[in-house]
Amino acid sequence: MIEMRDVGFGYHGQDELLSGMTLTLQPGMFHFLTGPSGSGKTTLLRLCFADLLPSSGQMTAFGQDMRALSRDDIADLRRRVGVVHQDPQFLDHLPVAENVALPLTIAGEAVDMEALRDLLGWVQLTHHARALPPSLSGGERQRAALARAVILSPDLVLADEPTGNLDWEMSMRLMQLLIELNKSGKTVLVATHDLNLIRATKAQVTARVLRITGGSLHLAGADL
Ligand SMILES: Nc1ncnc2c1ncn2[C@@H]1O[C@H](COP(=O)(O)OP(=O)(O)OP(=O)(O)O)[C@@H](O)[C@H]1O
């Protein structure tokens, strides 16, 4: 689904931040991406949805060379990869339900109101459907961002430190949703530096743990 062979990346005009990365995101698998702050977790996720392109090496997404994607290919890729950003942004003047449905609206597709209600119910935001985003708590914002990330039924869901500002109970509630998505067949990649979160999740689902250290990617040991 996403394959990297000896991929390197450096921000414009700077030395390589990531190098020699070889990785296969296996379909249907739950993955964690961990590593210290500033090690390049967000950067790696951005490579996975073609927000950044590799500086060197081979990288494919769904069989297509990332460095040869047309605009249409990028649009297709972004439908197949749902992203929960570290600090999700919403259109604050639109109710939560409309924010969640925005990817459909932007794609010019009709909104199936029943499916939208079901999705809001799944993330436990039914009672906040008409609320404006600034009134949501941190956990509610992350759940709205997750609903928005999956409304186009992506194959792969990327979440960047989704529990960064949440207490333990809220973090586990969000992880539960990601576990459910994975159990329904979706491939999931969660960037986090929270090892307790990784342990608690691994008690419920088989997960691969990838770690970035010193600018390259490793499979973490079984000690987690
Ligand atoms: N747009 C950019 N231009 C230049 N450097 C950048 C840019 N974005 C990130 N960096 C640098 O790249 C490095 C890796 O950043 P990145 O956000 O990928 O790390 P991270 O592991 O996700 O960190 P955190 O856990 O703190 O979110 C950092 O040193 C950061 O300052």
Image (spheres, helix red, strand yellow):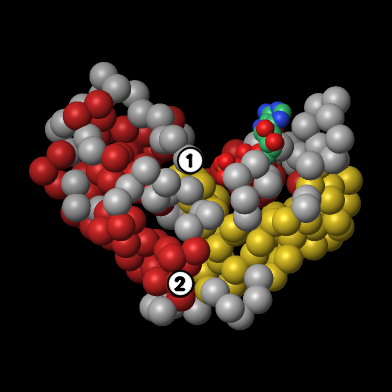
Q: Position of residue 8 (x, y in %)?
A: 84, 47
Q: Position of residue 50 (x, y in %)?
A: 67, 41
- Seen in the picture, residue 169 relative to 147 is either above or below; the reply is below
Q: Amino acid at mark 2?
A: Arg
Q: Is residue 47 left or right of residue 189?
A: right
The answer to whether residue 1 of the structure is visible from this angle is: no
Q: Is residue 111 left or right of residue 48?
A: left
Q: Amino acid at mark 1?
A: His
Label 2 or label 1, whichever comes before in sequence order: 1
The one of 167 and 42 positioned closer to us in this rendering: 167
Q: Residues within 10 Å of mark 1 (few under 14, many from 20)?
A: some
Question: Going 84% across and 60% down the picture, which residue do you hit?
Answer: 5
Q: Position of residue 2 (x, y in %)?
A: 68, 59
Q: Residues within 10 Å of mark 2 (few under 14, many from 20)?
A: few
- Seen in the picture, residue 124 relative to 188 is either above or below; the reply is above
Under circle 1, the secondary element is: loop
Which residue was labeled with disc 1?
85
Q: Position of residue 51 (x, y in %)?
A: 65, 37
Q: Which of the labelled discs sits on residue 147, or is there none? A: none
Under circle 2, the secondary element is: helix
Which residue was labeled with disc 2?
199
The answer to whether residue 168 of the structure is visible from this angle is: yes
- Quadrant placement of the N terminus: bottom right
The quadrant holding residue 87 is top left
The one of 179 and 18 positioned closer to us in this rendering: 18
Disc 2 versus disc 1: distance between alpha carbons? 22 Å
Residue at the left extreme of this rendering: 127
